[in-house]
Image: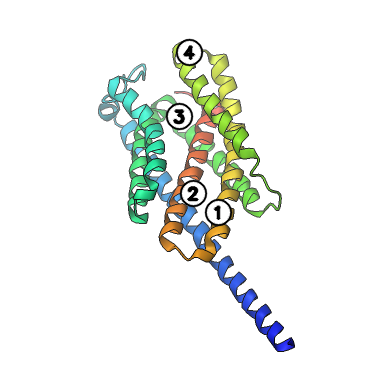
Amino acid sequence: MADFNTIRTSAAGARAAQIDEGLRAHMNKVYGTMSVGMLITFAVAWAVGSNPALLGVFRDPVTLSPNILGWIVMFAPLIMVFAFGAALNKLSAAGAQLFFYVFAAVMGLSLSWIFVAFTGFSIAQVFLITSIAFAGLSLYGYTTKKDISGWGTFLIMGVIGLIVAMIVNIFLQSPAIMFAISILGVLIFAGLTAYDTQKIKSTYLEHAHSGDSEWLGKAAIMGALNLYLDFINMFMFLLQLFGNRE
């Protein structure tokens, strides 16, 4: 009996070690995919934003007001997010990854105006601040023993409220409303960073025994998309608060 218990304990330990190793690989894929997406976004944004002729295709080069194509590009990422969620089950892992990178490029087009509106130094400064905050919040979500899944409903409702408020303020153009939106946006996406990180980890642990590498691959892409959106939105709201305008 003792030998059987020893064997069983050893097998359980080996299985736990295998799951831990798989989790690390899964999280590395999530963060790696997200990082590539970020690189694509800022490369496209800089390439378009630093070229007046290219930027003029989407916005007035003086007022930065979007034209018809600019409005399409502005709302395209939001539409693509919903389309990605709906089509995820039909896509392969490779197809989901390609879709994410295309989405990152379109997001870059929508953000290109920041390289005209804000100084390069303030963009870099806010990017650094966002990176440090994101790393700390994501680490908290990964390591905390506290179940923060209850945050999800509240935070998603907050995002919906932000979207509605931002659409309304497109017409009102109120600096006070934009200031309030930016503060709330930073807080909401800070919470989502921790929440999404814990969700990615718990989702992997729930399905690690299935051995479905295709599903886990797509789950990693979806996790990368969620964290990417958390980072981008937190960056943009912080830029609105602390960025120095040209």
Q: Which residue is mark 2?
A: 223
* Closer to the camera in the image, 73 or 237: 73
If you read the primary sequence from the N terminus, does the residue marked by circle 4 or circle 3 appear first? 3
Label drawn at residue 173:
4
| Front: mark 4 or 1 | 1
User: Where residue 198 sits: x, y (%)?
Assistant: 60, 50
If you read the primary sequence from the N terminus, does the residue marked by circle 1 or circle 2 appear first? 1
Mark 1 residue element? helix
How packed mark 4 is, by other alpha carbons closer than 10 Å (few <14, some 14-19, many 20 or more), is few
Label 1, label 2: how far apart the Cα atoms are? 10 Å
Classify residue 60 by image quadrant.
top left
The amino acid type of the residue labelled 3 equals Thr
Is residue 206 found left or right of 101 in the rendered image?
Answer: right
| Front: mark 4 or 3 | 4
The reply to whether residue 219 is visible in this rendering is yes
Mark 4 residue element? loop
Looking at the picture, does residue 226 appear above or below residue 238? Answer: below
The amino acid type of the residue labelled 1 equals Thr
